[in-house]
Every structure is written in structure tokens, then in C-alpha cells.
Amino acid sequence: MLFARDPFSSPILRTYLHLSRHPRCMFYLFMLYIPMEVKLWNDKRERGVHENFAELYAIIKATENLEKAYGRDILYSSEYDIECQKLIAHFKTLGSTLKETGPSIEHFADTYKMECPAAIYRLVTSGVPTTTEHRAAAAASPLTSAATVAESVQNFITAMDSLKLNMKAVDEVYPLLLDVSASLGKLSILPPEFEGKTRMKEWISKLSKMAAADELTAQQVRQLGFDLESSYNSFMAALPNATGV
């Protein structure tokens, strides 16, 4: 800023210096130069909600970008499938936390002007990767359908997520395994000795002998998680083979 020969001849500067002598003005001028902390939350609960919202925003954006990249043939199907499964799993885990405290996903996306239609469809409407939908369509026949395949995938993911959320009581786990077993039983493309069917029946038989309030031990939870993941991978691998794709 350029001043006249006499710096104090500037009318703006003279006014500033004059006002700064007033006690109240001096207080306000002093406050302008004090760094102040701006609180975004009042307690730990509000902080948790804000952090969950930030994570939800990141998941939606990441899913939208992933869908666009796959649609433009930038990713291999295997790469897309792995990343999409991770995002869907994280979304479902976070969704259970926000279920009672947060808005609907559609309302959340609309509020923050996210414009992520592909992500909303993948996370909310479909719940499975595009690759799974394609496999389901390929496996569809008079004896099976894409809806049944998608149902089986959803039941597997729900059961695996429940263990990650520390759900280990018999009355929590047992119904989920029944759903997995029932959906697998609807698929005639799977052989009777299919790994997933056998393992689910073994676990269902074991849990049926326990009380509803009983809880699985850490070792049992780990083994069940391993069996679910192994059965899920075998199930996904069996879909294209069953139709000769």
C-alpha cells in the first residue's frame, strides 16, 4: 500500500488510529488477532457422528469413481470386484451405525449435492458388484435366477459382516446361517456336495444344540468367518463354471 509523504496524512489510517484508542474498539481489534478454536461438535457423540458422515461421504465418492472407471474399461473385472466388495462391506458396516442417528443415504447425498447416482444404485439398490450381477444373469435358467444368486451373495455378506460387528450370540448368528443355507439350496446349479452347503449344515447343526443366549468363542468365531469366506469364494467361482461361461 502506498502512502503520501506523511504516512499519517492518510484519512483511512487516521480514522483507524483514532478509533483504536476507544476501549471497545481496542478490544475488538485485539480479538481479531487472537487465534480462536472453532468447535464442530460439543461432545464425543457429535464428534462420532461427524466422523461417520465424513466416512460415508468418502465411501459414496469412491464407489462412484470406481463405477465410472469400470464402465470405461479402465479396471479389470477382478480388480473392480475386489474393491467394490470392500466398499459395499464398509458401507453396510457403517450403515448399521448410522441407521438410527443419520438420514437416509439418498437424503444425505442430496443434502451435500453429491450427484453420485451410480454409487447410490450400487450401494443401496443393488448391494452387489456389477460383476456379480453379470454372473447371475449368465447363470439364470428355468431352474435358477439372477435374483436367487444375488440373494445368496447378500446372505453371505450379511453373515460375514455380522461377525466383524462382534455379533456372536447363537440367536444372532443362527438365523443368518439359515438364510445362507436356504438360498444356496435354491440353486440347482450347485452340486449337493457343494462346500458351502456342507459347511453351513454343519454349523447349523452345531448351533441348534446350544442355548439362544450362548455365545461363540473367539476360536469358533474365527473358524466360522473362515468357513463363510471360503464358501463364498467357492460359490463365486462356481457360477461361471456351472453355465460353461
Image (cartoon, rainbow, N blue to C red):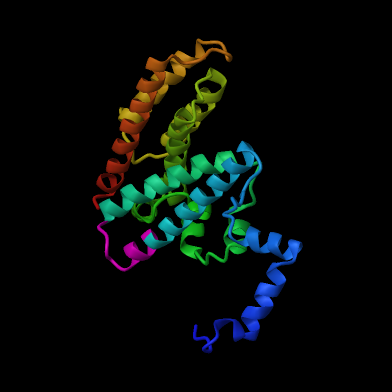
232 relative to 40 in the view: left or right: left
Residue drawn at 64 percent across, 59 percent down: 30
Answer above or below: position of 243 versus 168: below
User: Depth check: 122 or 37 in front?
Assistant: 37
Residue 6 position in % (x across, y down): 55, 86
Answer above or below: position of 202 versus 151: above
Residue drawn at 56 percent across, 11 percent down: 211
Residue 200 position in % (x across, y down): 40, 25
Pick out the residue farthest to the front.
6
Instruction: Please say whether residue 68 is one of the residues in the magenta stretch.
Output: yes
User: Depth check: 193 or 174 in front?
Assistant: 174
44 relative to 77 in the view: left or right: right
Residue 37 position in % (x across, y down): 59, 50
Q: Which residues are magenta?
A: 66-76
Residue 168 position in % (x across, y down): 50, 21
User: Depth check: 94 or 195 in front?
Assistant: 94
Instruction: Please say whether residue 59 is one of the residues in the magenta stretch.
Output: no
Answer above or below: position of 43 versus 178: below
Does the image show residue 192? no
Residue drawn at 45 percent across, 16 percent down: 205
